[in-house]
């Protein structure tokens, strides 16, 4: 069920979007109807080839077509074409079923139509306001207005969707943008370039450009799909390893996923890039992989470990390093895994590193690992509360953790307290 805030937000976007579309219909000359229909068909084809990032989030090459539409037909024609594309798309879902206007909830269709109409329409108005002239050559005279319009389109589209996701998930707007959407920026940059090139081609050679342009659009979509599939296969392999570890160590089920989430929050507070954070997330998921080589009776012993058993457990960072260092693409991750039990004051293991000798990524993993261990049950104790765990972490500033990391932890905990809960 949608909560009241979501319903109000969706209603506002729909009201604004439909109003803009009605106004657009009144502004378009009747002699351009055929052109709009032909471009609308092109937009439908582009919208009907999305790539699934998650079950709910997709990307498509339609952004290039929508940008092309607003640069050729202006804000009102562009809004109508973009809306036609999303209204009449026929999409094959991941489960194999077809989704179209007749089997989707009406409010989803109206919201999608409306947010695109607003994004494209306002971007078109910005294009004209900054000196752009629709339907003519973009390069070189109108290149800057076109780039500004593309940026406005992307930012508005992103913001409208991010606000909706924020309301649906009860997460902050900034968190949604950073985690779910920011990674799409390189995709936007390429499609914006492609949209401008497509506009130039259409102005020069007319509708024959549709045939020529659909081929590169399809190839872009195909290459991006290969990239996403390869990336998903990569994560699927990691998840299989995590399930194998969870099955062996029943007391730490869900631990790696919680460490991943906390490590990402700490990394963002430290200002690391999303590509860097993605590597840290992989390291977080794999940080305990060395425990696969530890006997189950030691891992699951219900009580205090002997010194000998503790020494066996302490071998897992090195074993994890040995496993991961065999994979060329995980050389950096292997080092971070090796050092995630080092202490800032040099009393950690396995190598007794201290201070800045310890990679920042390993320090992040260490704090995330300790916090989640504190708030989860163990064979020898019950879980601490979040507040208790928070204070324990702060008490170890300058010994186990660096002041810089503690400062990032305080800020992340204050902003995203719910995200610090242990996954069960």
Image: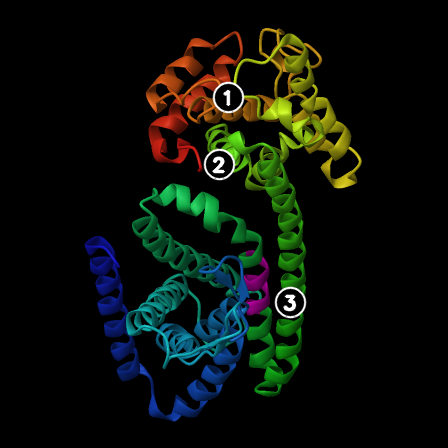
Q: Position of residue 149 (x, y in %)?
A: 44, 62
Q: Nearer the viewer, residue 62 or 267?
A: 267
Q: Which mark is residue 90?
A: none
Identify residue for label 1: 370
Determine whether 38 is above or below 189 in the image.
Answer: below
Kindly identify which numbered label has been placed on residue 220.
3
Q: In the rendered image, which quarter is residue 358 located in?
A: top right
Quadrant of residue 324 within the rendered picture: top right
N-terminal label among 3 and 1: 3
Is residue 108 something that shows in the picture?
yes
Question: Magenta part of the protein: which range?
Answer: 189-196
**Of the image marks 2 and 3, the number of the one nearer the N terminus:** 3
Q: Position of residue 356 (x, y in %)?
A: 62, 14
The residue depicted at 49 percent of the width and 17 percent of the height is 404
At 34% across and 48% down in the image, what residue appears? 169
**Which residue occupies the foreground of this view, 323 or 381?**
381
What residue would you read off at disc 2? 261
Q: Residues within 10 Å of mark 3 (few under 14, many from 20)?
A: some
Residue at 43% across, 72% down: 70
Q: What x and y, as percent, mark residue 135?
A: 48, 78
Compared with 36, 347 (above or below) is above
CA gap, disc 1 and disc 2: 13 Å
| Residue at the spot 46% in from the left edge and 29% down from the top edge | 269
Element class at badge 2: helix
The answer to whether 409 appears left or right of 281 in the picture is: left
> Could you tell me if the residues under marks 1 and 2 are in contact, i.e. CB atoms within 8 Å?
no
Based on the picture, tell me whether residue 193 belongs to the magenta stretch.
Answer: yes
């Amino acid at each position: 069920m949608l909560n009241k805030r979501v319903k109000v937000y969706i209603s506002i976007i729909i009201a604004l979007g439909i109003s803009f579309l009605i106004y657009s219909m009144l502004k378009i000359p009747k002699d351009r109807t055929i052109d709009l229909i032909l471009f609308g068909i092109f937009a439908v084809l582009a919208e009907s080839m999305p790539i699934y990032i998650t079950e709910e989030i997709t990307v498509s090459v339609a952004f290039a077509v929508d940008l092309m539409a607003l640069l050729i037909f202006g804000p009102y024609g562009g809004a109508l074409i973009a809306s036609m594309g999303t209204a009449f798309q026929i999409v094959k879902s991941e489960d194999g079923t077809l989704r179209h206007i007749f089997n989707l909830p009406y409010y989803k269709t109206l919201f999608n139509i409306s947010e695109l109409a607003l994004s494209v329409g306002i971007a078109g108005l910005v294009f004209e306001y900054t000196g752009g002239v629709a339907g003519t050559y973009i390069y070189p005279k109108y290149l800057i207005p076109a780039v500004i319009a593309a940026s406005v389109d992307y930012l508005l589209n992103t913001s409208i969707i991010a606000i909706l996701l924020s309301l649906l998930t009860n997460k902050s707007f900034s968190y949604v943008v950073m985690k779910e959407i920011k990674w799409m920026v390189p995709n936007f940059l390429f499609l914006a370039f492609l949209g401008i090139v497509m506009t130039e081609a259409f102005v020069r050679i007319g509708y024959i450009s549709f045939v020529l342009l659909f081929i590169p659009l399809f190839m872009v979509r195909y290459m991006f799909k290969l990239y996403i599939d390869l990336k998903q296969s990569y994560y699927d392999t990691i998840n299989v390893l995590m399930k194998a570890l969870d099955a062996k160590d029943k007391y730490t089920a869900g631990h790696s996923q919680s460490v991943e989430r906390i490590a990402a929050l700490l990394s963002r507070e430290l200002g690391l890039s999303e590509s860097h954070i993605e590597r840290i997330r992989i390291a977080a998921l794999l940080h305990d992989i060395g425990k696969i080589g530890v006997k189950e009776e030691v891992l699951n012993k219900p009580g205090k470990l002997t010194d000998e058993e503790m020494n066996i457990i302490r071998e897992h960072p090195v074993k994890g390093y040995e496993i991961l260092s065999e994979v060329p693409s995980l050389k950096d991750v292997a080092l971070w895994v090796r050092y995630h039990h080092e202490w800032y004051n040099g009393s950690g293991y396995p190598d007794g590193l201290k201070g800045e000798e310890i990679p920042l990524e390993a320090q992040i993993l260490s704090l995330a690992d300790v916090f989640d261990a504190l708030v989860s049950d163990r064979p020898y104790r019950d879980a601490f509360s979040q507040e208790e765990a928070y204070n324990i972490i702060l008490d170890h500033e300058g010994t186990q953790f660096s002041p810089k990391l503690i400062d990032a932890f305080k800020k992340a905990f204050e902003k995203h307290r719910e995200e610090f809960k242990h996954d069960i």
